[in-house]
């Protein structure tokens, strides 16, 4: 469903501040794969997601979604294939607009927007139906403005919006990191439910080792713009958070050692 | 077996009475108001009659007509500043441009209704120019609009061929209605009613036009395209992730906003009897003042309320100006101070400055308290 070939992204190329955020990422996600990505800050996790979403052009390589080379497509065109949920719950919704208006916007993701009424009674019915599964009572508050909702509620709506029209690929960028533990737990459950029901191909960035191992079907560890480990199946089953943390630390040690070598200490 | 009422029951009873009174009293308000009105009318009959025959109230009619005529400016400014969150100064150019296009068309004997459509298109083109410069060439929005504003001055002047075109004998939108209103006022009560009759006529016609424009804008902002436009101003990152080309939406918003302002320019030129190349100077601040006054006095949510509120804001603004211009302020030493029309711009700028600065100042004061 998603293939990246030799994907590279360099920021400030040719500058003293040059950062190679992604180096030769070769990734293949078959349909239905739910991949979680971990890595330290600056490992390139978010850059990978943004590159797939088309937020900025990549420096090298190719991005193929469902057989289509989308490398040169602008972000808004790629949105037809991609559903996204951001870390900041405020980012995913239009605050001054109502729940139903936000959902109506999401209903037309990647489709032509017409001069017909955005929120019709028929669509309202559909929104009520979708929201009632969340069991938050939001189906009775369709005309509430989103800025009156809590962060968790907003993130729930963002997740609903990202999957209202089935995306070919769902991108979750630490979408529970800004929430309190109880709310985060609910969002995790909802994520599992939605992705499980619709068999969505998903790429999820997380800082939470537990999430990385227990959500989805596959775990990637990134470091310095490269994919270091790629676990799935039995190997992943046998993995524990403790071992993952150890591996993480090992990589860091390696890095420190390299630095010492470089600095001659 | 009933026991003594508990505290909570008492409180509930009191609350019930309170809500009953609250529910009931608005019903008496109109009657009480009518009674007070009748008494006042009887007491003030003579001065009232004198006042009516003096026609000094025509100032108020004039202000109302202007408020409605400039109403589309308020909606346009609301669309760019509030909905799109784009500081657009093109407005100062699209107003005289709309006036110029309509005037040039009318003195050639063009259809007055068509002149409004042409004014819309001319204004919209100015808006599109700003939008293209901003989105394609990545030039700051304010600077882009100032560039278009400056350039459009030449186009406006070229369109008219001179700085000012009188429209006294042109077939304006008012011409078909003139005989009817003449019969109603001037033929009945004499020549001194000429000014009143033209104001009443303008108020009615402007009301119809601005109501239509408001309804169309309300409708548009609730279409799929309109929702995308609003989201572009609210959260560009989110709406881009939902597949909307925000650059395109900005251009559409600027086109509609400036088109409306072009229409306002066209109808005001026909009302005032001339089109002037300088008629747009400082209009953006007047529009902002109307938006701020309207939102403060009449509310801004939901959106359909806001579009009405900003029109009312423009009426209040024009009325305040009209009143301010008629007041003589006595100064010590027997001198009186009169505001001139040229003083209005400073007063308006100060008003908008205060309104824009208020939230910030309030926050700083709060910060000092804690």
Image (tube, grey):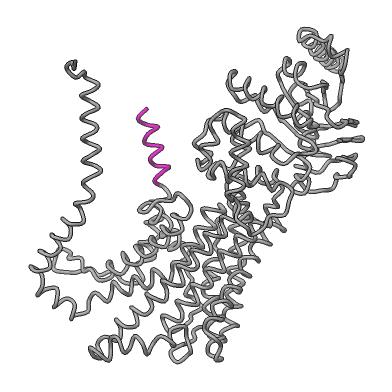
Which x, y percent locates residue A14?
Answer: 84, 39
Near-viewer residue (B1 or A237): B1
In the rendered image, the quadrant that contains the N terminus of chain B is top left
The number of callouts visible is 0
Give left or right: position of B293 versus A101: left
**Residue A6: quadrant of the picture:** top right
Near-viewer residue (A100 or B27): B27
Which x, y percent locates residue B253?
Answer: 60, 60
Vertically, is B354 above or below B121?
Answer: above
Near-viewer residue (A107 or B246): A107
- The furthest residue to the front: B1
In the rendered image, the quadrant that contains the C terminus of chain B is top left
What residue is shown at x 10% (from left), y 64% (from top)? B39
| B90 drawn magenta | no
Near-viewer residue (A254 or B318): B318
What residue is shown at x 79% (from left), y 11% (from top)? A244
Which x, y percent locates residue A32?
Answer: 83, 29
Vertically, is A143 above or below B17?
Answer: below
**Residue B57: quadrant of the picture:** bottom left
Give left or right: position of A221 versus B167: right
Vertically, is B309 above or below A29?
Answer: below
The residues colored magenta run B358-370
Give left or right: position of A240 versus B24: right
Which x, y percent locates residue B268?
Answer: 45, 76
What residue is shown at x 21% (from left), y 56% (from top)? B30
Q: Chief secondary structure of the magenta span?
A: helix
**Residue A26: quadrant of the picture:** top right
What residue is shown at x 60% (from left), y 77% (from top)? B154
- The furthest residue to the left: B43
């Amino acid at each position: 469903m998603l293939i990246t070939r030799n994907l590279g992204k360099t920021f400030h190329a040719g500058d003293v501040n040059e950062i190679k955020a992604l180096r030769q990422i070769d990734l293949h996600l078959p349909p239905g794969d739910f991949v979680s990505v971990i890595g330290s800050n600056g490992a390139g996790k978010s850059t990978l997601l943004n590159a797939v979403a088309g937020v900025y052009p990549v420096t090298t390589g190719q991005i193929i979604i469902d057989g289509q080379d989308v490398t040169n497509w602008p972000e808004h065109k790629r949105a037809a294939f991609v559903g996204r949920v951001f870390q900041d719950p405020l980012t995913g919704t239009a605050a001054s607009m109502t729940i139903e208006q936000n959902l109506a916007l999401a209903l037309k993701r990647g489709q032509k927007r017409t001069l017909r009424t955005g929120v019709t009674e028929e669509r309202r019915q559909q929104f009520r139906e979708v929201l009632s599964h969340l069991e938050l009572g939001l189906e009775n508050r369709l005309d509430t403005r989103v800025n009156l909702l809590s962060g968790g509620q907003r993130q729930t709506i963002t997740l609903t919006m990202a999957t209202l029209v089935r995306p070919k690929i769902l991108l979750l960028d630490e979408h529970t990191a800004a929430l309190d533990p109880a709310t985060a737990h609910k969002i995790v459950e909802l994520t599992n439910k939605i992705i499980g029901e619709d068999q969505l191909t998903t790429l999820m960035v997380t800082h939470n080792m537990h999430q990385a191992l227990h959500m989805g079907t596959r775990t990637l560890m990134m470091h310095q713009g490269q994919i270091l480990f790629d676990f799935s199946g039995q190997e992943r089953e046998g993995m524990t958070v403790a071992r993952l943390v150890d591996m993480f630390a090992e990589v860091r040690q390696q890095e420190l050692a390299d630095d010492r070598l470089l600095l001659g200490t | 077996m009933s026991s003594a009422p508990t505290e909570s029951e008492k409180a509930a009873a009191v609350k019930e009475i309170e809500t009953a009174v609250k529910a009931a009293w608005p019903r008496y308000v109109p009657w009480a108001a009518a009674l007070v009105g009748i008494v006042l009318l009887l007491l003030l009959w003579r001065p009232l009659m004198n006042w009516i025959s003096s026609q000094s109230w025509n100032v108020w009619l004039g202000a109302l007509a202007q408020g409605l005529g400039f109403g589309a400016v308020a909606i346009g400014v609301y669309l760019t500043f509030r909905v799109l969150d784009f500081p657009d100064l093109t407005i100062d150019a699209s107003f005289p441009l709309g006036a110029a296009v309509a005037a040039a068309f009318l003195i050639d004997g063009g259809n007055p209704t068509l002149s409004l459509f042409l004014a819309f298109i001319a204004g919209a083109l100015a808006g599109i120019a700003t939008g293209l410069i901003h989105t394609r060439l990545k030039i700051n929005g304010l600077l882009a609009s100032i560039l278009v504003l400056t350039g459009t001055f030449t186009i406006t002047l070229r369109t008219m061929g001179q700085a000012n075109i009188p429209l006294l004998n042109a077939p304006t939108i008012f011409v078909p209605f003139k005989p009817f209103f003449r019969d109603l006022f001037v033929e009945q009560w004499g020549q001194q009613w000429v000014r009143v009759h033209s104001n009443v006529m303008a108020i009615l016609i402007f009301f119809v036009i601005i109501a239509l424009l408001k309804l169309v804008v309300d409708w548009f902002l609730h279409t799929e395209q309109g929702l995308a436009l609003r989201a572009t101003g609210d959260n560009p990152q989110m709406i881009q992730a939902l597949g909307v080309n925000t650059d395109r939406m900005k251009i559409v918003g600027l086109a509609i906003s400036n088109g409306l302002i072009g229409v306002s320019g066209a109808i005001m030129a026909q009302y005032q009897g001339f089109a002037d190349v300088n008629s747009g100077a400082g209009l953006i601040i007047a529009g902002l003042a109307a938006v701020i006054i309207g939102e403060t006095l009449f509310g801004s949510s939901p959106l359909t309320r806001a579009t009405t509120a900003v029109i009312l804001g423009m009426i209040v603004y024009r009325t305040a100006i009209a009143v301010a211009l008629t007041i003589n302020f006595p100064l010590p030493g027997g001198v009186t101070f009169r505001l001139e029309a040229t003083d209005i711009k400073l007063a308006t700028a100060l008003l908008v400055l205060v309104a824009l600065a208020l939230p910030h100042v309030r926050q700083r004061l709060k910060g000092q308290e804690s």
